[in-house]
Image (cartoon, helix red, strand yellow):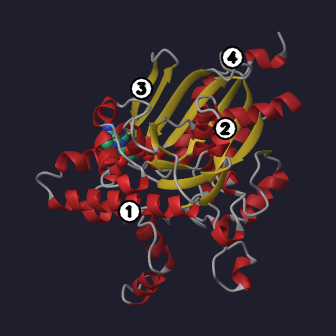
């Protein structure tokens, strides 16, 4: 048995209030176990791990004040199970590495230095991600650490799609449209390639609708337009982020709201979107509440309206539409939200098959519709492991 046959790859995916991780066998990339720490920073935090047969390996309430403490908790678990799950690589989802770092790469001290210099491009995400990497690097010195950037899928957007019409002195500092959810889009395209002949000929929109939400337009197999820009705040209305705003709204908040940078950041990252309108960012709860609560109803209506508008815009960007794919927590699980988004979109060839949609079938379009509509679960952790494996083989 070669070295990698008995080793594992750990994929780490840091969110704002959660930490997801999955363990894969290095040779086969078969998932061995997966876990989460949810509600970090809240008293109702929970740490859970289950294996590939859904047997619970860990399930306990935790109160962890920040992501760093959550990372320490996960590391302790893997340290105490090191003989059972020796790690050959640890792959990290990294929001972005600026214009020059998009391909997956081994995390050296030089790369960490570069990422530290890029913090101003993603001040909300990069500091915590860098700390997570350093903590894992210190704990598992023999494992290769790999950075997988969420921007890669959008690397080939044409200049007219990614350039901001702003003075060069800012755009030269990296103020451009990067796009995110790239690992999710890459996974979906890989999955589609196994199912759909001549995939590259298809004009596709993938809608990743979760707490963070975005869409990408794919033509000739390439992501050519997307809804997020320099940060994951833009585009669609999201759980706690506003999506696209008139730049005048920011000026208004600065002047009339007298907001400082940090306050504005908190408002746009954590207090806007569905939460600002409906009181919560949890779509499942909004759907339960909407009959008694007009704010919940208004929040859901805004979300669906925003999604419809962007489907139209992205279809225009690629000159038509053959396939619409729903993924992410809302896209994968909510037939109601898919139905509302697709309602009155026949003019674009979008027509759901009601029963297939409610059955949560993989293909949910009406047989007569021009656009095929699919539901595909995403797996960012698997794509991180897939990229990380290449570095083990080359080491
Ligand atoms: P994140 O961006 O944090 O990874 P997820 O992809 O897990 O988010 O999506 C979380 C969202 O999905 C929440 O708003 C949640 O309410 C919603 N969601 C999950 N399951 C359902 C469901 N069955 N019906 C409606 N919404 C759902």
Task: Determine which quarter of the picture holds residue 196.
Answer: top right
Q: CA gap, disc 4 to disc 3?
A: 21 Å
Q: Nearer the viewer, residue 362 or 104?
A: 362
Quadrant in the picture for the N terminus: top right
Q: Residues within 10 Å of mark 3 (few under 14, many from 20)?
A: some
Q: Disc 4 vs disc 1: which is toward the camera?
A: 1
Which quadrant contains ligand 1?
A: top left
Q: Earlier in the sequence, mark 4 or mark 2?
A: 4
Q: Earlier in the sequence, mark 4 or mark 3?
A: 3
Tell me the residue that label 3 is attached to.
Answer: 59
Percent x, y for residue 303? 34, 58
Percent x, y for residue 291? 13, 51
Q: Residues within 10 Å of mark 2 (few under 14, many from 20)?
A: many
Tell me the residue that label 2 is attached to.
Answer: 384
- Please tell me the numbered disc located at residue 306: 1
Q: Earlier in the sequence, mark 3 or mark 2?
A: 3
- Please tell me the numbered disc located at residue 83: 4
Q: Earlier in the sequence, mark 3 or mark 1?
A: 3
Q: CA gap, disc 3 to disc 1?
A: 37 Å
Q: Is residue 157 above or below residue 222?
A: below
Task: Determine which quarter of the picture holds residue 4.
Answer: top right
**CB under 8 Å between callouts 3 and 1?**
no
Q: Nearer the viewer, residue 340 or 93?
A: 340
Disc 3, SS: strand
């Amino acid at each position: 048995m070669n070295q990698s046959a008995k080793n594992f790859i750990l994929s780490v995916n840091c969110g704002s209030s959660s930490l997801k991780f999955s363990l894969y066998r290095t040779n086969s990339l078969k998932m061995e176990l997966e876990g989460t720490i949810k509600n970090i920073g809240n008293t109702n935090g929970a740490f859970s791990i289950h294996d590939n047969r859904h047997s619970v390996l860990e399930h306990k309430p935790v109160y962890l004040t920040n992501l760093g403490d959550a990372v320490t908790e996960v590391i302790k678990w893997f340290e105490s199970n090191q003989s059972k799950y020796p790690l050959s690589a640890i792959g990290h989802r990294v929001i972005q590495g600026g214009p020059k770092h998009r391909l997956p790469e081994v995390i050296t001290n030089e790369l960490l230095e570069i990422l530290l210099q890029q913090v101003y491009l993603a001040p909300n995400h990069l500091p915590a991600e860098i700390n997570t990497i350093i903590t894992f690097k210190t704990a598992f010195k023999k494992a290769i650490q790999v950075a997988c950037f969420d921007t890669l899928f959008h690397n080939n957007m044409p200049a007219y799609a990614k350039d901001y019409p702003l003075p060069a002195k800012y755009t030269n500092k990296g103020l451009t449209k990067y796009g995110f959810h790239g690992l999710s889009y890459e996974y979906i395209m890989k999955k589609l390639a196994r199912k759909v002949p001549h995939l590259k000929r298809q004009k596709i929109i993938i809608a990743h609708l979760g707490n963070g939400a975005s869409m990408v337009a794919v033509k000739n197999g390439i992501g050519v337009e997307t809804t997020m820009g320099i940060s994951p705040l833009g585009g669609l209305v999201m759980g706690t982020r506003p999506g696209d705003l008139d730049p005048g709204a920011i000026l208004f908040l600065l002047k009339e709201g007298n907001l400082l940078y940090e306050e504005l950041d908190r408002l746009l990252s954590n207090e806007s979107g569905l939460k600002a309108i409906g009181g919560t960012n949890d779509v499942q709860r909004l759907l339960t509440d909407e009959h008694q609560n007009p704010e919940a109803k208004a929040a859901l209506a805004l979300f669906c309206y925003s999604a419809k508008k962007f489907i139209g815009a992205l279809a225009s960007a690629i000159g038509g539409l053959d396939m619409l794919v729903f993924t992410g927590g809302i896209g994968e699980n909510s037939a109601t939200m898919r139905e509302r988004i697709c309602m009155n979109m026949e003019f674009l060839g979008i027509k759901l098959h009601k029963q297939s949609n409610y059955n949560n079938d993989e293909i949910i379009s009406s047989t007569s519709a021009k656009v095929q509509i699919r539901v595909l679960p995403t797996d960012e952790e698997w794509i991180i492991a897939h990229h990380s494996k290449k570095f083990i083989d080359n080491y």
